[in-house]
Image (cartoon, grey):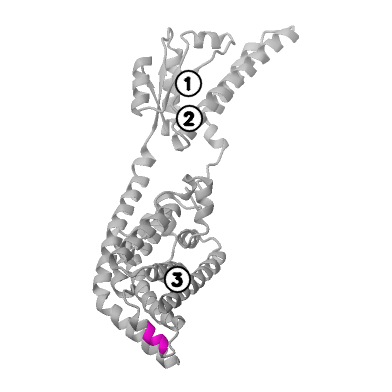
Amino acid sequence: MIRRQFVYFSLQLKRAARYLPFIIAVTLVLCISLSLALSSLVTTDQGDVRHKKIKVATVGEFVDSYFDFGVSAIQSMDSSRFAIEILDMTEEEAADALKRGEIVGYALIPSDFIIDAVSGDVGHIQFVTNNSGVDMFSLFKKEILELISCLLVESQNGVYAMEEIVFDICVDHSDVYDHMTVLSTSYVSLIFNRANALEIEVIGVGDSLSFAGYMFSGLTVLILLLCAIPCCPIFIKRDMAHSRLMNANRFSPLRQILGEYSAFLCVMLINTAILIISMTLGAGKIFNVIPDLAELTNTEIILLPLRLLPATLAITALQFLLFELTDSLIGGILLQFFAAVALAYTSGCFYPISFFPKAIQIFSKFTPSGLARAYLSSIISGADSLIYVISLIAYALALLFVTVIIRARRIRA
């Protein structure tokens, strides 16, 4: 019995070997195309995004030079100058720039704002922005508003309130202004050194990975999903006569599926190895470019295709089930393609899964592609991946069981 099983597996593997050059060629085209796209994302993520400043405009008719002096001091001394650029515009120019997306907002400064502030009456600054959703720019907008309301308004109110209290309760006012000067100087120093008061920790866009690292895991799963398309001519059963004959000779549907799936799995393992190698070369030594991957040792990189085995098992089991659902070559190709695109999209392979509604995030956790992407992300980030391994193997066994049932029904039909 074992010998017959091995012979059937060998025959299926020989059939697949005849198409292997074509399968590898298609895999290389997919890998190189997507790795170049990933390389472009990496370049953008490390280049333009890091050096792009958020532009904010100030609008108002200033009758004194104090405001311009303050803006110049912030732009030359404050730590915010590395992230924010303050522009002087008219209200019409600022509104047009905001509509074109050139600035994230503009502040309407009252003409007597500085004069009133000196006398202790801090006026209101109107900040105009658009509703662009939740992104990094909106977070900076919120930070700007909090700077104005908390650091400026509340602190100034406190300084002048203390001055009024001192004048009310103290008889000797000779050194009040000296103390007020020291306090104001300390306040300005605190504002200009506020970067030392907090620590920023970047946890990434998803799964504790950077954008480039996350997209690497997503595109890897996408390629695995698409790699079944060139295998359609080999494993789609357009005629069940041969399967019925083997079943009559006591070669059950289970043994047939195991032999054919084992050959398909060997082909996909070769594709997985090619996938890692070609993406590494095609993206310009991508393992050294992406920070998440740069931490992997050479041994971990070499063993990465082997560590992808649980994800490959689940995805290939799903693809083999799709092979069994159709008896048409064109229909099988279309089914594989649309299933791959739909699963990749809902699993967060095109965009970070955190960008999707909660319902889709929950749904992705119950798909083999979603589990595979999360598993690959856990490998890259060094997180615990045992639960994903167990889930992926269980998924593969369940899908193969369904495939056996479908094969048995097709034989009896």
User: For the residue marked with disc 1, what is the amino acid?
Assistant: Phe
Q: CA distance from mark 2 to mark 1?
A: 9 Å
Secondary structure of the residue carrying tag 2 is helix
Please give the residue where the numbered disc 2 appears in the rendered image.
Answer: 141
The residue lying at 34 percent from left, 60 percent from top is 337
Which numbered dot is residue 143? Answer: none
Mark 1 in CB contact with mark 3 (< 8 angstroms): no
Q: Quadrant of residue 22?
A: bottom left
Looking at the image, is 51 positioned above or below residue 353? above
* Residue 150 in picture, x, y percent from top left: 58, 25
Dot 3: few (<14), some (14–19), or many (≥20) neighbours within 10 Å?
many
* Residue 316 in picture, x, y percent from top left: 41, 69
Looking at the image, is 114 positioned above or below residue 132? above
Q: Quadrant of residue 276?
A: bottom left
Q: Is residue 413 left or right of residue 285?
A: right
* Quarter occupied by the N terminus: bottom left
